[in-house]
Image (spheres, rainbow, N blue to C red):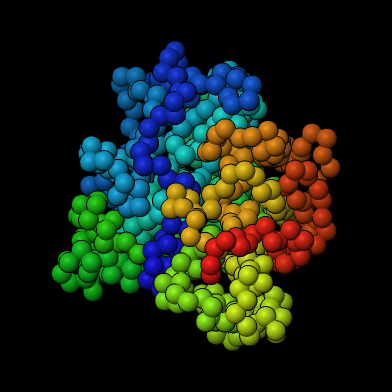
Amino acid sequence: MASLTVLLSILCSLLIPVSCSLDPKDVISPNILVNLHGQGVVIGNTNTTAWTGQSYMQFRGVPYAESPSGELRYKPPVPRKPWSTPLQATDYGRICPQLFTYNRLSPDKLQGDLEDCLTLNIFTKSLNAKQPVMVYVHGGSLQVGFASDHKPDYLLEENIVLVVIQYRLGILGFSGTKTPDMSGNFGLMDILLALQWVQEHISAFGGDSSKVTVFGESAGGELGGALLISPKTPPSAFHRLIIQSGSIVDRLATNMEPLAQVERVCRALKCAHCDLIDQSQQCLKSAPVMDLLKAAEGERFGLIIGDHYGTMPEHPAKLIEKTKKNVPLLTGFTKHDGAIVLGFLYDDFKASHPDFNSVRVADFATAIMTWMNDTTGLTNNAMQRLLFPAYLWHNSDHRRALPAYFDLVNILFFKSVMLGFTNKLFEKTEQSPIYFYTFDYAGEKTNFGFDLGNSQYPFNGGVHHTDELIYLFAMKPPLNAKDTEVAKKMVSLWVSFAKDGVPKVPDGPQIAPMECNRGPYFHIDKEIRMDNDILKEFTATIDDPNNKNLDRPSKMW
């Protein structure tokens, strides 16, 4: 399944534009100057919110660390040295090295120090207030993504300070040998330093350093979970946490063979003596960025357990039991989160089985379940019994099996591991409130297929992975009237949680925290409503009377 390996390398990625140009309505003046104590002056500019046209200030591409290049490659981040002349922060900073996006940039965009990317963007409406701070960690399977994709035009309708950070990715951020020379987990260390920067400087932008909420989606959510359980996270780093469709206990969140991975990349670079740790490390340290990215193409990255600096000293499941950091948590998934995987699996399976009419439901479903590597067969048997009646299992009626396929990938790749994370938290004797949601709204726009397209599929993406981000950030403007109302609800829920630790929506129900590992929880749709048993979400597609909307009758399987 070679093509699936490549496609899964962009699992959880967002819509990637060909270039990082400014939004047409970005305003270049007037300039705003802010003096950061012990750092220097930054120059920002202004923009306006999407719904009410409120003016806000933006400071983009502000460096929080020295460039992790040269001798600093594969080293913990170093705080940025003070600058003597005012720093222009009126444009987004360089995106961190990532092959998927770099391959689509013009040569002039690939000049200079490609690794000098550890920057953050700050958006605020007041420099003199004391507003809650929301720090966003982007997703992208720890391999792609960047801050400029996450614009503040919706969230800044409320009185908050939004910070969007960039961190090292892929072979530069999440590879390592667990040694002092190449410990691993550098992207996580970058985020920790960025949070330290927020504590030191956010008051200059009208932010309250005692009310910081970290939120992230997919791999960004996994990193949020890592921050919660890492012994290297200071207690003051953040005070609320939002995890969207990403679980630190997912087996794909960790890299169980980092030494072998470094050796493979070393050999792909055609270096000598790659079986020796010091030689393979030196090979990766000295390789040009683009060569390094190409050599690592097809690799999967995750957090490294037992890194030298102790950011992840044990398996996440063990660290959850030991962590003493208890903060209010808002977490959940989208109704059809797994559709992203279903699309990738369909592409791969179709390549080797052009005539899907000759493929049994059992064959395709088994191929999906094989990815979980259940050697006992217990999980696979349970999934068969739960989702596939015997008559369906043995025929080739893929259209009738489509709702079951959706629920299968939902369970295996997102819903089960998300609940597994909260279950681990519930096992602790003390735990702050946990609010669990499912995002069920199917709007006009979707991220299904991202910018690779989705016209080849005989099914729609439903409420796809990352679709909730459309309603938090101005990713696909403009929204129609109905979608805008849902976006306003999303902003209200997220911002109220950042302010008070309790998600709220005007004229909506009182949202209760979970009382056990099955609920209660709430649905985000045209209306917000409470529900009692989250395990119902395992068959949300099969039980949906409108699940025929997922089918594309005009497309052949």
Q: x and y percent of residue 328 in the render?
A: 69, 47
For residue 359, above or below residue 416: below
Q: Residue furthest left?
A: 272
Tell me the quarter of the picture where residue 39 sits: top left
Q: x and y percent of residue 195 in the render?
A: 50, 40
Query: Does residue 328 appear in this view?
Result: yes
Q: Residue furthest top?
A: 30
Q: x and y percent of residue 209 in the render?
A: 58, 32
Q: State the residue at coordinates (44%, 29%).
A: 23
Q: State the residue at coordinates (59%, 57%).
A: 460
Residue 547 vs residue 95, the one in the foreground: 547
Residue 133 vs residue 112, the one in the foreground: 112
Total marks placed: 0
Tell me the quarter of the picture where residue 280 sits: bottom left
On-image quarter of the N terminus: bottom left
Residue 491 vs residue 368, the one in the foreground: 368
Judge left or right: residue 325 versus residue 342: right
For residue 263, above or below residue 65: below
For residue 50, above or below residue 80: above
Q: State the residue at coordinates (63%, 70%).
A: 399
Judge left or right: residue 2 versus residue 503: left
Query: Does residue 408 appear in this view?
Result: no
For residue 219, above or below residue 110: below
Judge left or right: residue 174 versus residue 231: left
Q: State the residue at coordinates (31%, 40%).
A: 116
Q: x and y percent of residue 479 in the render?
A: 61, 35
